[in-house]
Image: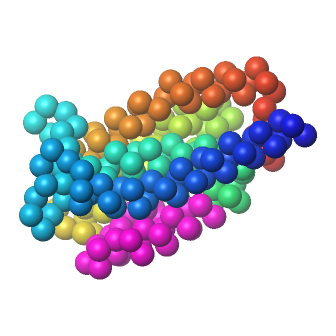
Amino acid sequence: MLLERRRDAEGFAFLVAYIACIPLANWMIGNVGTVCVPQGPCLVPVAPGLMAPSGVLLVGLALVLRDLVQRRLGIGYALGAIAAGAALSGILAPLPLVVASTAAFLLSELADFAVYTPLQKRGLVLAVLSSSTVGLIADSIVFLGLAFGSFEFLAGQIVGKAWMVLLTLPAIDWLRRRDRRLGLVPPT
């Protein structure tokens, strides 16, 4: 019972962090960066000579958090979080980008879900890395294609999101080892 409460509490913390990534990513795009383009996004360097809108950092993190919501709370909460996130993304996106933002969020998170769900039984780190990679590529392609009809910033988008996923992997591995030690099992 105590382990179930702990699992649920962690799950709700991951859920709150996941949902918080959406408005924070939208805010960062207009306010945080080494370069802010007039009437455009603020950009951050993600690799030598490669820039991306600053919000991509939180999009990468959101993909990992969605996996953790599913690990702690189950498939129903994960799908509910995706639906809520897509709606929030559509509400917060600038009017010209509503369709692109909502579609990219929904499709990338569902792709993440589709890859994570079967792989989670083979290993948490593998599942998170694989599903997040598929999700971040889908998000980048769908968003840029629908929003701008151009893939000029595709490399920066993918690299920026990938950095955040890679930075979370040591914590994901720690969580996996701790769960095993405590006997903390995902919900059925």
In this rendering, the answer to whether 111 lies above or below 45 is below
Dominant SS in magenta: helix
Which residue is nearer to you in this view: 48 or 137?
A: 48
**Bounds of the magenta segment:** 80-107
Residue 188 at least partly seen = yes
Q: Which of the 4 image quarters holds residue 42?
A: bottom left
Q: Magenta stretch: residue 102 in it?
A: yes
Which residue is nearer to you in this view: 70 or 17?
A: 17
173 vs 47, left or right, is right
User: Where residue 52 sits in the image (x, y, percent)?
Assistant: 21, 48
Q: Which of the 4 image quarters holds residue 147?
A: bottom left
94 vs 69, left or right, is left
In this rendering, the answer to whether 168 lies above or below 80 is above
Q: Magenta stretch: residue 95 in it?
A: yes
User: Where residue 170 sits in the image (x, y, percent)?
Assistant: 50, 24
Q: State the residue lying farthest toward the front.
A: 31
